[in-house]
Image (tube, rainbow, N blue to C red):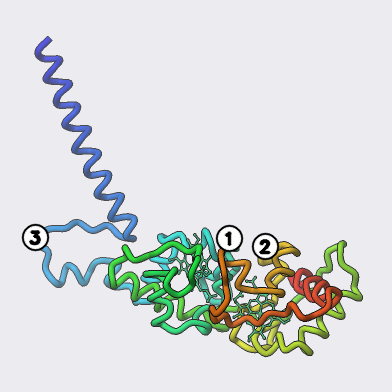
Amino acid sequence: MRRERWNDLILVIFLLVGLGVFAAKGIALLEGFWYTPSAASTEEEHAASPLARLDLVERGKLVFQAGGCTSCHLARLEPGGPLVGFPVGPSLSNAGMRRDERWLREHYIDPHKLIPGSKMNSYAYLPKEELDALVAYVKTFTPAHEPSEEPTLSIPERFTREQVERGKALFSSQGCVGCHMIGKSGGPIGPNLTKAGAHGRTDDWQLQHLKDPLSVYVIGPTEGIPWPMPRYGHLSDEDLQALVAYLQSLR
Ligand code: HEC
Ligand code: HEC
């Protein structure tokens, strides 16, 4: 009887120690590397840890992936790579050109301060080095990260070729091309739209975004918030539909 109790006790201690080690390793893993704190670790040893050897941008990529950014954003993890993620917030294509480092850092720490009613969560809990790395990584989201191949038009059945042609003409005449790249031409202020039809946006989203861009991202009043994408609510319904048809056909 006694012996069995001892066995139970030893088993419980083993389990607790095991759990502790597992949790510690888990946390270390979350930080992107196996790190065994030890009082004896020298500077040299520390410099040899895998994370220390990665440069800032590479580190930022790990923080970006661990931070779940793609659960709300479309982004290219590698230059020219595919857009991955979910379009809850804006696509991060070209985000490095739209935003300066100070804005990015402040937005991670306190999104509500910059965009009242922001749906983005705060990353204020990240250590300073990880915030620096994240800023450096997102600053690389520039046209260098975008594909340069020409777009292919694949017109969904709900649109006519006429609408798409009209939308294409409007894209130039309304100045969209000044901010957006399609294929090899266009400006670098907004996201690359070469594959706009594959961004996972619905027709309603595209229409609403054209009328009032900020309204698709932010809850609550939006007056007075600077937003780089202009409103096109003054265009006729036919023109707006034509633009949506063109955008949704870009694949
Ligand atoms: C819960 C969803 C969510 C998560 C997770 C999230 N974001 Fe956001 N993000 C948003 C939304 C929504 C916006 C639009 C503006 C706002 O509401 O703040 C935004 C805006 C941004 C912008 C500005 C984009 C622009 O148009 O210039 C950047 C940059 C950004 N997020 C980066 C990140 C990074 C990096 C991470 C991960 C560390 C992240 N976000 C995680 C929802 C999210
Ligand atoms: C002054 C620069 C500017 C002009 C002009 C402009 N845009 Fe934008 N556009 C942006 C920026 C910046 C964003 C990213 C923020 C956002 O999504 O609202 C954006 C986002 C978009 C998106 C969302 C892409 C995605 O899936 O995340 C679409 C689609 C778009 N623009 C289409 C257009 C069209 C069509 C026109 C012309 C009728 C136009 N834009 C004119 C700057 C501009």
Q: Pointer 3: what residue?
A: 39
Q: Residues within 10 Å of mark 3 (few under 14, many from 20)?
A: few
**What amino acid type should be assigned to the residue bearing mark 3?**
Ala
Between 69 and 15, the residue placed more toward the observer is 69
Tell me whether circle 2 and circle 1 mark residues in contact (CB < 8 Å): yes
Q: What's the CA distance linking mark 3 and mark 1?
A: 43 Å
Give the answer, above or below, for where 193 lies relative to 49: below
Q: Position of residue 219 (x, y in %)?
A: 56, 64
User: Residue at left 70%, top 65%?
Assistant: 205
Name the residue at the top extreme. Answer: 1
Q: Quadrant of residue 88?
A: bottom right
User: CB of residue at label 1: within 8 Å of ligand 1?
Assistant: no
Residue 200's mark? Answer: 2
User: Residue at left 60%, top 78%?
Assistant: 146
Give the answer, above or below, for where 135 lies relative to 12: below
**What amino acid type should be assigned to the residue bearing mark 1?**
Phe
Q: Position of residue 87 (x, y in %)?
A: 60, 63
Q: Earlier in the sequence, mark 3 or mark 2?
A: 3
Q: What's the CA distance linking mark 2 and mark 1?
A: 8 Å
Q: Pointer 1: what residue?
A: 86
Q: Position of residue 174 (x, y in %)?
A: 76, 87
**What amino acid type should be assigned to the residue bearing mark 2?**
Gly
> In front: mark 3 or mark 2?
2
Secondary structure under tag 1 reads loop
- Horizontal arrangement in the rendering, residue 206 relative to residue 156 (left or right): left
User: Residue at left 45%, top 75%?
Assistant: 114
Tell me whether circle 3 and circle 1 mark residues in contact (CB < 8 Å): no
